[in-house]
Image (cartoon, grey):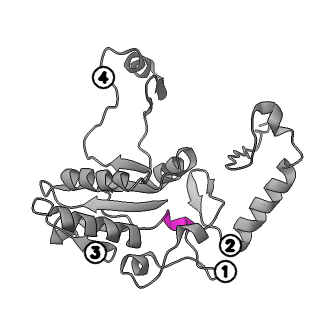
Amino acid sequence: MRIISIVGLKNTGKTSLTGKIIKELTNREFKVASIKHSHHQMEMDHEGTDTYKQMEAGSGFVVGIGGRTYFNINERFDLERILFLIKLIENPDFVVIEGFKAYPYAKIATCEEVKDEYTIKVVNSFEITDDELLELVDLVEERSYDILETLFVNECGYNDASLIGQGKLDYNPETQAEVNLAIDGVNIGLNRFVSDYLKQTILGVLTPLKIKEYGVENFDDIDITIKNKKEKDNNI
């Protein structure tokens, strides 16, 4: 998974450029997810619908399933948590984010004022040509990278993300950690040894299971949730 943020001041064409980048990535047959950041209240449902009524009645987590599936959660999630959940549910090739300029991910800026060490290009969203857009998406493929805590180089620790964005350090998503870990909603970085150890240990335990009885043929993706809360002392 690779992450790219489109950042800029208000009315500098962020939404327009975000749409163009998503369309071009899709044309290249990549699986794309997107995140929109807003300082205003955002509603994914409308007053009068059954799911809206469920939320109004006090449900803090409403799921709507029809032609599409959507989640309406009465909580503000941190970007890192959202990225982890996207990777867990869909694992797209790219996540295109509009906003979140304070985070250390590869960025395309629509104005010079928000440029920082993670900015890979500053563009004029209103004047960008078709050829320039193609070159820009080429750059996105080359310089964007995964959730920060999942990055490592061999056994030597984490990549310097800003160096990837500057083109000074190569990033290959095929060589990154195969195990993603979050504890209490916080992404935990794993080096290659721990990642491989957890993977092999879990596969070793699960392999004897009769998974075909459940309609499962292979161990392509494994999701495990461990509840490790201590029981309350009844004497207190």
SS category of the residue bearing label 4: loop
Give the residues in magenta. 146-150
The x, y position of residue 219, in whole percent, is 74, 49
Which residue is at the far bottom? 168
Q: Give the quadrant of the C terminus.
A: top right
On residue 116, the disc is: 3
Q: Is residue 78 or residue 136 the one in the foreground?
A: 136
Q: Amino acid at mark 1?
A: Glu
- Which residue is drawn at the image coordinates 13% and 65% (left, top)? 124
Q: CA distance from mark 3 to mark 2?
A: 30 Å
Q: Is residue 119 left or right of residue 28?
A: left
Q: Amino acid at mark 4?
A: His
Give neighbour class at mark 1: few <14, some 14-19, many 20+ (Cα, 10 Å). Answer: few
Q: CA distance from mark 2 to mark 1?
A: 6 Å
The x, y position of residue 217, in whole percent, is 76, 41
Q: CA distance from mark 3 to mark 1?
A: 29 Å
Numbered disc in front, either 4 or 1: 1
Q: Earlier in the sequence, mark 4 or mark 3?
A: 4
Q: Are marks 4 and 3 in contact (CB under 8 Å)?
A: no
The x, y position of residue 198, in whole percent, is 76, 61
In this view, 54 is above or below 184: above
Q: Earlier in the sequence, mark 2 or mark 4?
A: 4
Q: Give the tally of numbered discs.
A: 4
Q: Earlier in the sequence, mark 4 or mark 1?
A: 4
Q: CA distance from mark 2 to mark 4?
A: 46 Å
Q: Earlier in the sequence, mark 2 or mark 1?
A: 1
Q: Which residue is mark 1?
A: 155
In this view, 171 is above or below 26: below
